[in-house]
Amino acid sequence: MSWRFLPNSNEFIWYSQRDNWGHLYLYDLKTGKLKNQITKGDFVVMNIIKVDEKKRLIYFTANGREANNNPYFTHFYSIGFDGKNLKWLTPAVGDHSISLSPDNKYFVDTYSQPDVAPVSVLRDINGKQVVELEKTDISMLSAAGWKPPTPFTVKSATGRFDLYGLMYGPTKLDASKKYPVVVYIYPGPQAGSVGSWAFSPARGDHQALAELGFVVVQLEGSCNPGRSKAFHDACYGNMGENTLPDHIEGLKQLAKKYPYLDLDKVGIWGHSGGGFATAAALLRYPDFFKVGVSQSGNHDNRNYEDDWGERYIGLLTKDANGKDNYESQANQTYAKNLKGKLLIAHGGMDDNVPPYNAYLLVDALIKANKDFDLLIFPNARHGYGADNNYMMRRRWDYFVKNLMGAEPPKEYLIK
């Protein structure tokens, strides 16, 4: 939570992006007038952890303040109500998770990176380390052949922003060979493709897919959260962009650094908003994205929750020709552009993104005389539940057959 009600002092702390960054402001509770801005600078306040009303101190987490650091790494700070005496309480590089002691005199600081295992230390409330509690031992994980993802940085399609992501390759990658690329996408705008930037021994099936002979890429595109307002607003009004220009430009930059990426064989998959983005990739950029697995996509936001579309696109308006601002973002509008292989999957009982979102696209593809594949899980909702392993296997098979050009084992059973 990034605001606080303080009746004892007739004040409240409010969160705003009015200066392009997410910051805290102190207001008078009776008059509603601004007393002062509390936090300032090119960083984003993420959460207020504790407010000490007697000492008039705020303890909060924030992203992106420290130079030469991944802007998605969360750190812990304290600052006075007056905006003075900002203290950085977690100096170690990494993504930090904080747990305060009941008396608020100490906190456990656990920090890690996607490719660096967690360390837990005890610090006093001023950030001084008292004792190292534990270092995670991943020796057995490494001995079993585990391979961490490779963090990377690229420029956005506009050149305006630095973008961050993770890349997965086969354990026995041969840099002299070429590997098809599979993008995992979730375009947000309320979340991104990577998710947590803390250490995790497994991130879905990305490494498993890579072991089949692919390089798998996750990228936080401009429009995803956790950065400046300008970054988050990059696609405001046009969710149909789906961070796809950033993905295309990012892959081109990665291929220069890692020549084993075969950009003539690029696939993409995602679920929900990622399913929307996947179909959009095949239909809007058919010469770049060759194979897609679109799961449970909200392909037309006129047929999805108004609290989603209106939040990021705005109200529905029509131009002089009677076309509305949502139509140009709906996937079925571009059905005639399909060149590659597209698998559309949906749960027949989906009460989040109802299956008629898929049927709109299916109907348009049929009318455009396009070949595609359709998979319906009759009793599944938005997540496929007991059918998840079947979906995963079909997804692997689809990329192996259509992107790699190999024949997958028939009806392989994932237990």
Image (tube, grey):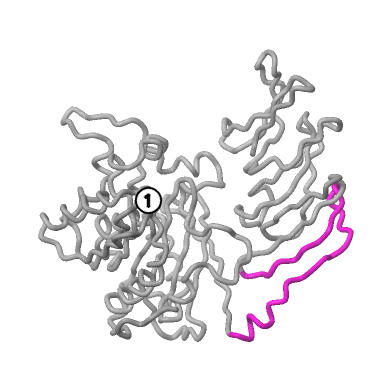
Residue 384: image x %, image y %?
39, 62
Amino acid carrying mark 1 in the image: Asn
Q: Residue at x 49, y 74 (%)?
A: 207
Q: Nearer the viewer, residue 61 or 262?
A: 61
Q: Residues within 10 Å of mark 1 (few under 14, many from 20)?
A: many
Q: Position of residue 167 (x, y in %)?
A: 50, 69
- Locate residue 29 relative to residue 287 in the image: left or right: right
Queried whether the magenta region covers residue 174, the answer comes back as: no
Taking the spot 72% from the left edge, 43% from the top edge, the residue there is 49
Q: Secondary structure at mark 1?
A: loop
In-front residue for pair 246/359? 359
| In the foreground, 345 or 46 | 345
- State the quadrant of the N terminus: top right
**261 with respect to 28 (left or right):** left
For the point 58% across and 74% down, the residue is: 148
122 within the magenta span: yes
In the rendered image of this protein, does residue 68 appear above or below residue 45? below
Image x and y of residue 365, in percent: 16, 57
Q: Which image quarter is the C terminus in?
A: bottom left
Count of labels shown? 1
Q: Is residue 276 left or right of residue 323?
A: right
Q: Where on the picture, by quarter, is residue 319? A: top left
Image height of 300 relative to 55, above or below: below
Image location (x, y in percent) of residue 282: 27, 60
User: Which residue is identified by label 1?
Assistant: 242
Residue displayed at 27% across by 29% down: 317
Q: What is the span of residues highlighted in magenta in the rendered image? A: 115-144
